[in-house]
Image: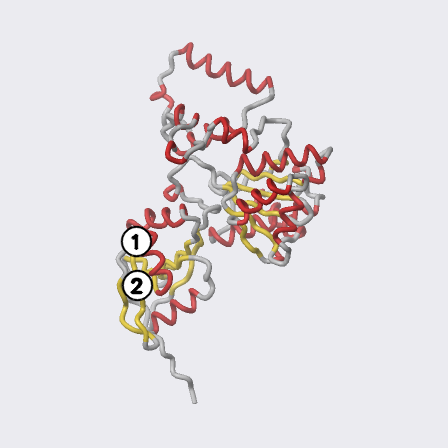
Amino acid sequence: MKKKNLHTPVIKQYLDIKAKHLDSFLFFRMGDFYELFFNDAVEASQLLGLTLTKRGKSAGKDVPLAGVPVHSSSNYIKKLLNFGKKVSICEQVEDSTQSKDIVKREVIKVLTPGTIIDEEFIDDPKEKYVCALDEGGAMAWCEVLTGKMFVYNKGNDASVNNSEKSIDAIFSRFEFEEILVNETVEKKALLETFFYGLQHTELSKKIKIISDSLVNYAFWEFDENKAKLLLKERLKTQSLEYLGFTDDIPIMRASNALLSYIEKNIGMPFLNIKPPIVFSLAKKFFIDSTSQRALELVRPSFFEYKNATLLNCIDTCLTASGSKTLREWILSPLVDIQKIEERQLSVRWLAKKGVDGKDLRGIP
């Protein structure tokens, strides 16, 4: 005897799609609205101040419902991302007037705090980096919006002291939104590998802070061979030798995990990627987390004085990308004398010519 389906067709479709995206809010397109059902609706109503109602019954139970208009959905999505949540966008992928049955729907992209490619979802100058850690002591990280990508292997530093400084500088400077880790690896042991040398108290603090950003990721995506193929395709090159790290297996494993995660979320090939750079303390001065807090460079010592930072005092940039660049310059000042002098000469030329900032606006 055929088992009777207790759910309405729409709710069954929703549940089938939701089962593949359990870790995110599913924005389910219905006409001019994105609807959220069940636990998503309850939690979203609390976080976003939405009215919680119900869409009849399914399987004999009330179906909690909350919705947002499509035309203003970006504001709500932005808030969820700022809460550290993931959002899956499920669209109608066929014309409802042409469908004899229920209209077909698919998740076209997944928005996460570290893989944002649309500026409409960004309202602060902070860069949004996503990172992948490999158990071999390597890491790769990227800002998806700009395509900037870096790689690093702590085993390649000349001394343990250098690697400790580099790791602290990396985590202090880039403040990763998401950190991908192999789902089969013990997380505490992995983090201890990277922060080896820290005092027990400091290590515990660091692990506690970072653990909220950890994302379990499929072990088969940490694949150095896939990384070579993917990088060649995305960078449109036949050889990767110029990158200088393709023989480093841990770096390549981390790189593939990072890039595959980005592409799965944005729902398309990551064509915006720039050639990855091997991270080095030699080119810029990276300020450690303790000094950053003490100097109140980009974050205040006390939350109630959130505007009392150096960045807030001097940031008169008109665009988000300008504010992000200024933030980057504050946190990682130049140490190369030639680069410093080039920047000074540029500023002097602009001041001497009396160039108005308005004249520069709109120049790419």
Task: Say if 156 sits above or below 268 in the image.
Answer: above
Q: CA distance from mark 2 to mark 1?
A: 16 Å
Name the quadrant of the C terminus.
top left
Q: Quadrant of residue 302?
A: top left
Helix, strand or loop at mark 1: helix
Asked if the residue at tag 1 contacts the one at tag 2, i.e. Cβ–Cβ closer than 8 Å, the answer is: no
Q: Secondary structure at mark 2?
A: strand
- Per the rendering, the mark at residue 65 is 2
Neighbour tally class for label 2: few under 14, some 14-19, many 20 plus, Cα within 10 Å: many
* The residue positioned farthest toward the right in the image shown: 158
Q: Which mark is residue 331?
A: none
Q: Position of residue 146 (x, y in %)?
A: 48, 38
- Where 172 falls versus 121 (above or below)? above
Q: Nearer the viewer, residue 150 or 54?
A: 54
Q: Pick the residue in front: 296 or 214.
A: 296
Residue type at mark 1 is Val
Of 86 and 349, the residue lying toward us:
86
Taking the view exactly as shown, the residue that stands out farthest to the bottom is 1
Placement of the N terminus among the 4 image quadrants: bottom left
Q: Residues within 10 Å of mark 1 (few under 14, many from 20)?
A: some
Three-letter residue code for mark 2? Leu
Residue 292, given in percent of the width and then of the height, sits at: 51, 30
Q: Position of residue 108 (x, y in %)?
A: 43, 57
The residue nearer to you, when weighing 255 against 177, is: 177
Residue at 35% of width from left, 17% of height from top? 356
Quarter location, residue 286: top right
For image coordinates 51% across by 45% down, the residue present is: 271
Q: Which residue is mark 1?
A: 70
N-term-proximal mark, 2 vs 1: 2
Residue drawn at (30%, 53%) of the image: 70
